[in-house]
Structure formats: C-alpha cells, structure tokens
Image (spheres, grey):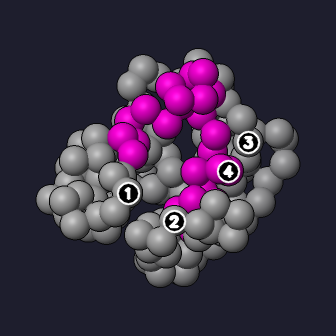
Amino acid sequence: MKIAHALLALATAAGCVRDDPIAGRRLFVEHCAVCHGAMGLGDGPATARLTTPPPDLTRIAARRDGVWPMLEVMSIIDGYAQRTNPRAEMPVISDFVEGRLVKFNHGNGQTARAPENLLAMVRYLESIQSPEPTGYAP
C-alpha cells in the first residue's frame, strides 16, 4: 500500500489525478452496489436475478496472491476486457469511461491519461481490499 500511496503522491504533485475516495465510493454506490453489494462482497439485491454471481470485490488482490492489478481492474470496468473475457451481465457504465481525462502513473514510471471517474473507482476498489495488497502490477 505504501508504494501505491507514494506513486499517488508523485502523481498528485506532478499535476496528475487527485485521490478522491469519496467520489469513488459515490460512484460505486450509484452504479455497482446493486449487484456487488454495499460493501463490495458480491451480495447486492440484484444477485438473485443474475446467471453468474458477482465476485467479491474486496478480494481482488487476494485472488492474485496479494497483487493489486490496477490496469486489469480498469480494463474490466471500462469494458475493454470484454473482448477477451466476455461478461454479459457486467455493463459498461458511461460515467466511468466518459468525462474529464487526467494523467496518472500506472506504476512503471510512465504516465497515461484516463477518465477521472474510472481512476476514482479503481482507487476506491483498491482501498477496500481485504487483506491490503502486498504488491502492485501496472
């Protein structure tokens, strides 16, 4: 977690994306909690109507041996991963892929631009990992 926070501090100082957990939480509650549950455990009220149960979003890093896969998570949320790993019931939500683009450091020293809301969502999901990630992959 310390590495991610250091990268975030560098990105913020460089005029890149700001850390806004409140925005990420608001977006999660508005768009994701119906399926993934208020705490991200995969127990939302719409679960009974789904063919595939939503995953527990608090265990993303744990399922990857403690590694937080930032770009992988971004590609699932923005719909890019649906080309290779279709998720019929996982919608692409325009609030995450449209809007203001901001710079961010994706962990390998390079900066890129991505939608601010997408980054807020990914940072929120990182903040609810249990246990906390022990490593980071761009």
Query: With 7 as the anchor, is 121 left or right in this view?
Result: left
Residue identifier under label 4: 71
Near mark 4 (Cα within 10 A), the count class, few <14, some 14-19 or many ≥20, is: some
Cβ atoms at labels 4 and 2 below 8 Å apart: no
Q: Mark 1 or mark 2: which comes first in sequence?
A: 1
**Front-most of 25 and 12?**
25
How far from the left and from the top, in percent, is residue 54? 36, 52
> At 22% across and 47% down in the image, what residue appears?
43
User: In the image, what residue occupies the spot 28% across and 41% down?
Assistant: 41
Q: Secondary structure at mark 1?
A: loop
Q: Amino acid at mark 3?
A: Pro
**Kind of residue at disc 1:** Thr
Say which mark, if any, is on residue 52: 1
Label at residue 138: 3
Picture coordinates of residue 25, whole percent (x, y): 31, 53
Amino acid type for the residue under numbered disc 4: Leu
Q: Secondary structure at mark 3?
A: loop
User: Which quadrant is the N terminus positioned in?
Assistant: top right
- Residue located beneath label 2 in the image: 87
Contact (Cβ within 8 Å) of mark 4 with mark 3:
yes
- Callout 4: SS: helix
- Identify the mark nearer the N-term, 4 or 3: 4
Q: Residue at x 44, y 67 (%)?
A: 90
| Distance CA(mark 4)–CA(mark 2) | 17 Å
- Closer to us: 131 or 123: 131
Residue plotted at (42% across, 52% down): 20
Residue 132 visible in the picture:
yes
Q: Is residue 69 found inside the magenta-colored segment of the image?
A: yes
Other residues around mark 1 within 10 Å, as few (<14) / some (14–19) / many (≥20): few
- How many angstroms separate mark 4 from mark 3 (CA)? 6 Å
